[in-house]
């Protein structure tokens, strides 16, 4: 369910093999929750009551299919001062929890949908989603997200603020254009070149495509992938602006119920096309709801096997795929992830490293080199931004932020509260980032030559020190020296001196080889004496996964 400022929509689907789905039912009702919000800051009580009735009908349909339901609310509920009251009423009356998502997440869900259905290759692309209350714009190179922006340029909001005449008088049209241009100009600048293509989702984009298709006399059918030129968008925006509401309501291809807000929406698309300098606009009919469904399919809840071992494969496969898309050296990243996991498991129980942190560390290790796609200089900071704005299936927004921060501190200065990205984390997350990034630094150092010389690592802990033994056929001098250079951050994070040594590989029996073949079955648990040592040195008294 998608509860927007203009419409409420339901999409019911059946999951098929390979992560695809088949649509079973769709429902759409115009609720206009965003009406009057710009003036009062509140959702009107009558509109709220009507919306709850719509949601009740949609929930009954979903329940009839026995469907797992996710209900997502966007800008109207997000911005209204009584948005929480609306959510609580829905929960009390319908037993339905509404997830209020941020503009950033809204944009990334639209991007996930576009990336699934369009071949980005290595092109510069922009993805835009227009709703009743906001506009989201994502800029990317291929599937590497670079920027995510959200603007208060929704169709309902702009209509109420600027459409003060019918048809729109020149001075009102000028004020509308100025508002759009000023808002876009504050933040939207394509620093890495003009996008080759703009992919649009939302009612305004589909409305423009429907009008264009009707004017061309083309057969009615799916609009998925339908293309408009920049000149067509500009011409359609001018046509709609000059027509009175009565004439727009009769315009071929346009849904009469959208006639009142389409002028503002078309103006936004036209000014966005001009600002980005794109020549073509492609329609993604599926958009936000498709992104929500894909996130539900790809990112199910973490399952735990008997014995407490996490089933990490599904979402880490996605992280691995993203690393490949960002052109990382996947063999190096896999090696770093494997070694980091060994170190993590040796430290886990004694240093209060919760089980989900293991996945955060592993994903950060797989993705730590993605910043090289943009530049070698400050690649760790580039990695932070690319990961933060990536639609990583299966990981929550908080986990993505943790992954991005851990990758950010793979090298360079240690995490500091003066760093905005680190300061905005809660205390517990800052603690985890310090520890996990210290582990990642060591693991990355252990493959400094990218030759995967370290066959294995083991970490032995006593009250006085930590001993990191690196198994290799011959002394890996470069790796050992790099570890010694980077150990200061580890020593500070874990309050323990670190010694690094080379150890010749020991012979393994065939059975041992089989047992050690997977990183999931890797390092042994921390030593029993570690908990006692940790408490004695001021570490948290509660040990083990929480």
Image (spheres, rainbow, N blue to C red):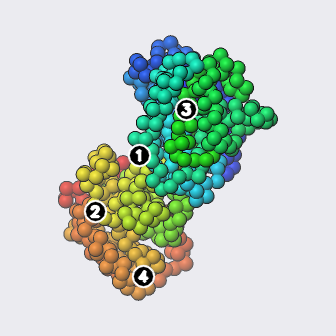
Q: Position of residue 40 (x, y in %)?
A: 40, 18
Q: Which residue is mark 4?
A: 472
| Residue closer to the observer: 8 or 479 | 8
Q: Tell which tag, 1 or 4, sits nearer the viewer.
A: 1
Pointer 2 or 1: first along the chain: 1
Do the residues bearing badges 2 and 1 touch, measured as CB atoms within 8 Å? no
Depicted 120 relative to depicted 439: above or below: above
**Pick the front one: 261 or 403:** 261
* Foreground of the two, 476 or 6: 6
> For mark 3, does the 10 Å Cα neighbourhood hold few (<14), some (14 to 19), or many (20 or more) residues?
many
User: Residue at the location (55% across, 15% down)?
Assistant: 50
Element at label 3: helix
Above or below, 48 against 469 in this view is: above
Disc 4 crowd rating (10 Å Cα; few below 14, some 14-19, many 20+) is: some
User: Which residue in the structure is indicated by mark 2?
Assistant: 413
Q: Looking at the image, is mark 2 or mark 4 earlier in the sequence?
A: 2
Q: Secondary structure at mark 4?
A: loop
- Horizontal and vertical percent for residue 17? 69, 49
Q: Which residue is mark 3?
A: 267
Helix, strand or loop under label 2: loop
Any mark on residue 398, and which? 1
Q: Nearer the viewer, residue 172 or 32?
A: 172
């Amino acid at each position: 369910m998608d509860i927007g400022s203009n419409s409420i929509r339901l999409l019911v689907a059946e999951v098929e093999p390979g992560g695809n789905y088949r649509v079973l039912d769709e429902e759409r009702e115009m609720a206009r929750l965003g009406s009057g919000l710009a003036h009062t800051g509140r959702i009107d009580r009558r509109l709220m009551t009507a919306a709850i009735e719509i949601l009740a009908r949609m929930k009954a349909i979903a329940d009839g299919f026995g469907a797992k339901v996710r209900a997502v609310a966007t800008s109207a509920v997000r911005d209204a001062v009584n948005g929480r009251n609306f959510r609580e009423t829905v929960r009390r009356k319908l037993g339905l929890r509404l997830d209020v998502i941020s503009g950033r997440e809204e944009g990334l869900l639209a991007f996930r949908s576009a990336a699934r259905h369009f071949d980005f290759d290595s092109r510069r692309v922009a993805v835009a989603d227009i709703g009743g209350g906001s506009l989201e714009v994502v800029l990317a190179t291929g599937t590497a997200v670079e920027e995510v922006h959200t603007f208060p340029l929704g169709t309902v909001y702009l209509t109420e603020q600027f459409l003060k005449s019918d048809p729109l008088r020149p001075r009102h049209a000028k004020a509308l254009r100025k508002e759009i241009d000023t808002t876009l100009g504050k933040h939207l600048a394509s620093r890495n070149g003009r996008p080759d293509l703009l992919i649009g989702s939302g009612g305004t984009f589909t409305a423009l495509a429907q009008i264009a298709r009707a004017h061309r006399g083309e057969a009615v059918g799916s609009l998925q992938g339908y293309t408009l030129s920049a000149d067509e968008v500009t011409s359609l925006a001018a046509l709609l602006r000059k027509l009175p509401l009565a004439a727009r309501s009769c315009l071929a291809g346009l849904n009469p119920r959208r006639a009142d807000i389409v002028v503002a929406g078309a103006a936004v698309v036209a000014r966005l096309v001009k600002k980005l300098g794109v020549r073509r606009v492609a329609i993604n009919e599926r958009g936000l709801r498709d992104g929500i469904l894909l996130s539900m399919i790809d990112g199910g809840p973490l399952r735990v096997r008997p014995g407490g071992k996490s089933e990490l494969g599904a979402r880490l496969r996605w992280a691995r795929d993203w690393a490949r898309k960002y052109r990382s050296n996947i063999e190096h990243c896999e090696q770093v992830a494997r070694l980091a996991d060994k170190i993590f498991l040796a430290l886990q129980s004694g240093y209060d490293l919760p089980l989900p942190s293991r996945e955060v560390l592993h994903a950060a290790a797989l993705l730590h080199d993605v910043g090289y796609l943009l530049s070698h200089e400050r690649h760790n900071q580039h990695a932070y931004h690319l990961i933060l704005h990536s639609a990583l299936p299966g990981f929550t927004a908080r986990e993505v932020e943790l992954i991005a921060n851990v990758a950010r501190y793979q090298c360079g200065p240690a995490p500091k509260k003066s760093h905005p990205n680190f300061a905005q984390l809660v205390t517990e997350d800052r603690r985890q980032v310090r520890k996990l990034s210290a582990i990642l630094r060591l693991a990355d150092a252990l493959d400094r030559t990218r030759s995967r010389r370290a066959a294995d690592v083991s970490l032995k802990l006593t009250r006085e020190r930590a001993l990191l033994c690196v198994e290799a056929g011959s002394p890996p001098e470069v790796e050992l020296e790099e570890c010694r250079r980077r150990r200061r951050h580890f020593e500070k994070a874990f309050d323990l001196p670190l010694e690094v040594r080379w150890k010749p590989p020991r012979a393994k029996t065939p059975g041992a080889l089989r047992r050690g073949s997977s990183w999931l079955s890797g390092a042994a648990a921390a030593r029993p004496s570690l908990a006692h040592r940790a408490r004695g040195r001021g570490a948290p008294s509660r040990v083990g996964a929480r």
